[in-house]
Image: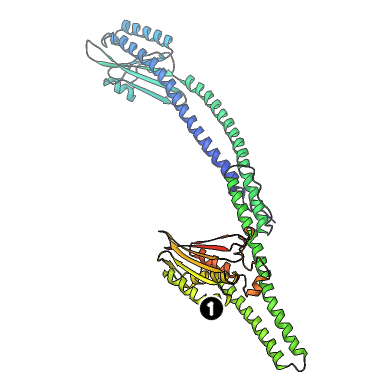
Amino acid sequence: MATISDKLPWYHSIRWRLALSYIGLSIVPLLIFNFSIMGFITDYFVNNRINVIQPRAAIMSDIVSGFTFTSLQQEASIRRLRDRVRIRSSDWGVRIIVVDDNARVLDDSNRDALDSLVGQTLLQSSVLEALNGRNSTVLHRGDESLLYVTMSARDEISGRVGAVMLVSNIDDIFDSLSEFRARLYLYSLAVGLLVFVLVFVMSHRIITPLRQIVRVVQRMSAGQLNLRIPITSRDEYSILSRTFNNMTEELEQVERTREEFVSNVSHELKTPLTAIKVLSESILSQESVPEEVSREFMQDISSEVDRMVHITNDLLALVKVNQREQSLNIAPTDINKLVEDILKRLSPLAEQKKVILLYEEVRPVQIDADEIKLALAISNIVENGIKYTPRGGTVKVVVDSDHQSAFITIQDTGPGIPEEEQDKIFNRFYRIDKTRDRDTGGTGLGLAISRSTVLMHNGSIKINSKPDEGCVFVLRIPIRMS
């Protein structure tokens, strides 16, 4: 037989779901952390470079401001400016560009290179902002990572405004960060693999008890109700296993009860049927049967038929009581009057047995109940008390209540019931003395019917008895059905 896990695709397995869930919960935050930390570190190093270049740009702005734009038209002034630009550019490792108020490049530290901008008009947005008195810092990422820091340079004599731009190549920062990023991602991958292995092992330990439970449940569903789930822990699985084991014990008990019920029904019906068959064959085997003998045999047959009808009626009553879908005809019920009517109906049986019936009404009691079914339950217990109480004994019924429940106490002075038998007397066809009900005409179903009826009313029934001291049955019925 294929197991449930065999029928499931791997992506429907709880083990894989747990593993992927844990991995997602661990890897995704790790990736977010990686991206965040890389952004933070990048900003940190770039800002450090900016903090280094900006003061140098301010120094160059002061140097340029020391020249008048008029003097910069002279070769000597240009030469002095170029010398200072070259020195500062060499010392700082940056490219320095100086523009006048018309955005024309007066000097470029790369003036000897092919990309020299000397004499060209530089219309970058940062230059135009500097000419308008606003300093700016721009990071450009392309083939090269360049940092542009632009500051205004004012000619104090003429009031004309030029600009100084320092251009720094920061590829070294991003190259270092690339190496760091590669290591970070490598470590993250290693952590991810470690998490995957640990989670897979943990999920295996989590799922293994569940699979064990499933295997046992499958075998139980095939009919092996004697199996039990081993309890090896103190977690939720142990609670589930213990609960399921209890349920299995109940199922075994139900199965045993069913088998016993069928056996008892067969036995109870077989006895009168056998008697009927023997009596009828006795009549048929004789050619001439005296009328008085024939009449006696027919009376015996009629008695056995009545017994079968009695058993059948009790069985039907028990089945109806046990039907969950059966509804109760709930109505206000006067318990005192109900008990009085039951005792009046059973008084002929008590007189015949020379048993005294006593009734005590502690207080008037009215409840919501199905009067017909509850009357049958009480009547069965009182009738049993009368049947099994010897001559001269008493059967006493007491009606009482509190603010929640009604209490009906039925006490007899019969032979009593041993303590080890008290839990079994409500089972169908159960008899303490297997021959006793033959003499009294009982079927062994009365107490089972009474118990089922009381449970249908959300009540309870208890027994207190000792051998040779009689029995006390206490029926508790809620005053209001919830």
Indicate whether 104 appears above or below 16: above
Q: Is residue 6 visible?
A: no
Q: Nearer the viewer, residue 416 or 171?
A: 416
Q: Amino acid at mark 1?
A: Pro
Q: Quadrant of residue 271?
A: bottom right
Q: Residue tagged by mark 1?
A: 348
Q: Position of residue 375 (x, y in %)?
A: 49, 71
Kindly identify the residue that appears in the image at 59 percent across and 69 percent down: 389
Q: Position of residue 451 (x, y in %)?
A: 55, 65
**Element class at badge 1:** helix
Q: Position of residue 312 (x, y in %)?
A: 61, 76
In this rendering, would 108 be left or right of 7?
A: left
* Residues packed near mark 1 inside 10 Å, few (<14), some (14 to 19) or many (20 plus): few
Q: Is residue 187 visible?
A: yes
Q: Position of residue 178 (x, y in %)?
A: 52, 25
In this rendering, would 30 be left or right of 306?
A: left
Kindly identify the residue that appears in the image at 61 percent across and 53 percent down: 246
Indicate whether 352 appears above or below 109: below
Q: Quadrant of residue 155?
A: top left
Quarter of the image that includes the C terminus: bottom left
Q: Nearer the viewer, residue 405 or 52?
A: 405
